[in-house]
Image (cartoon, rainbow, N blue to C red):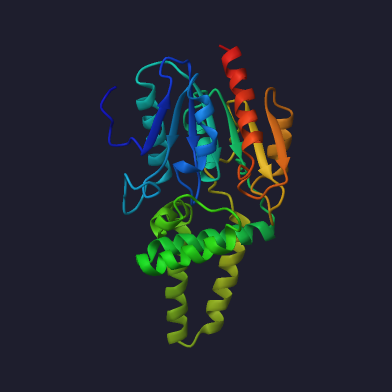
Amino acid sequence: MKQASEFVLPHNLSGNPESSTILVYLHGYPDSIRLWDPFYEPYEKENLVLRISYPNFDARLHEAWGRDFPELIKSIKETIDYAKDGKDYKVFVVSHDWGANFTYRFDKAYPNYINNGIIMDIGWETPSDLRTTLISFSYQFYLALAFLLPKGIGTAMSNLFLKVSLKEHVPYNKDDLDNSINYPYYYVHKMNLIQAAVLLIVYIMCWLTNRNLLFWAFLLLFVAYKYFTWGNNNSLAGYKPSFPLSFIYGLQKGFMFHTDNVIQYLQNKENCEVHGIEKGHWVMDNNEQFLNEMISRRLKMVITSQ
């Protein structure tokens, strides 16, 4: 096997290198590679299996600022290419949460590289209604801010969020989590954090000069601007998957992470399918049979298409 480059991410590689298909697993926040423990061993005999993690989500690689999205997507490709070791494998992706987002970004950057896949609970379009927008912005901005704070405070903030949001899901790495894994939210909201700092400076100046009304007028205009321009900087704007996929999402959530457009597009696309199931965000929890049957069935599609 060739020398790993600096971009290669923490990963576990197993299975049959003589096969024609590589399964790539991408987990999300706040999970680790071990999320996939019940979902990869049945496929090792006939496939090469690659489970990828990211800086700070895995003890093998710590980086103070993590990696921004372009660098992380490049790193995922470098890791898959490293595992392929020059062989022309069909690529089958299984992803969840941020892993799903990374899959879409990867596919946009390298169209037709992925041959098939299963994507869980995150669409390439997210709802833009006021309620969902406010909820999404609030928790994401909170986690982005926690990333910037000292480890003790930031980790306490992150753990509070996880305690409220995870419900019955227990990450395998729960005892090793800290705020350093929040960097995807930081890179989403980097500009918002800068704007918040500017707002704070404006408020202090207005308070010192006794012009509070001016600040509230400025704040109102700013909020209106953010609302009407929300999503304009979405890097997935206009994107559609270049590969057939099965989209699985949980029905038992306060709001969805996909739009009706995502569902309609997949329902009308050849070899794509949609499954809304009675689960929360972690649709794979206590659902091994369903997901393993789905992986096996869609893997056959890849094999028969060769």
Q: Is residue 100 above or below residue 160?
A: above
Compared with 282, 39 (above or below) is above
Q: Is residue 258 visible?
A: yes
The C terminus: image quadrant: top right
Q: Is residue 86 left or right of residue 243?
A: left
**In which image quadrant can residue 284 be found?**
top right
Q: Nearer the viewer, residue 249 or 58?
A: 58
Residue at x 51% of width, y 66% of height: 160
- Residue 235 at x, y percent in the picture: 52, 43
Is residue 221 or residue 41 the one in the foreground? 41
Q: Position of residue 261 (x, y in %)?
A: 71, 39
**Residue 105 seen:** no
Q: Could you tell me how many numbered marks the image carries?
A: 0
Residue 202 placement, left or right of 96: left
User: Where is residue 274 shown, x and y percent of the image?
Assistant: 70, 34
Q: Residue at x 45, y 45 (%)?
A: 32
* Quadrant in which residue 133 is drawn: bottom right
Q: Residue lying farthest left?
A: 3
If the image is split into quadrants, where does the N terminus sit?
top left
Q: Residue at x 58, y 18 (%)?
A: 302
Residue at horizontal 51 percent and vertical 45 percent from the top: 98
Does 107 sit above or below residue 300? below
Return the x and y of residue 144 as percentages of the image width and height.
46, 60
Tell me: 127 left or right of 143. Answer: right
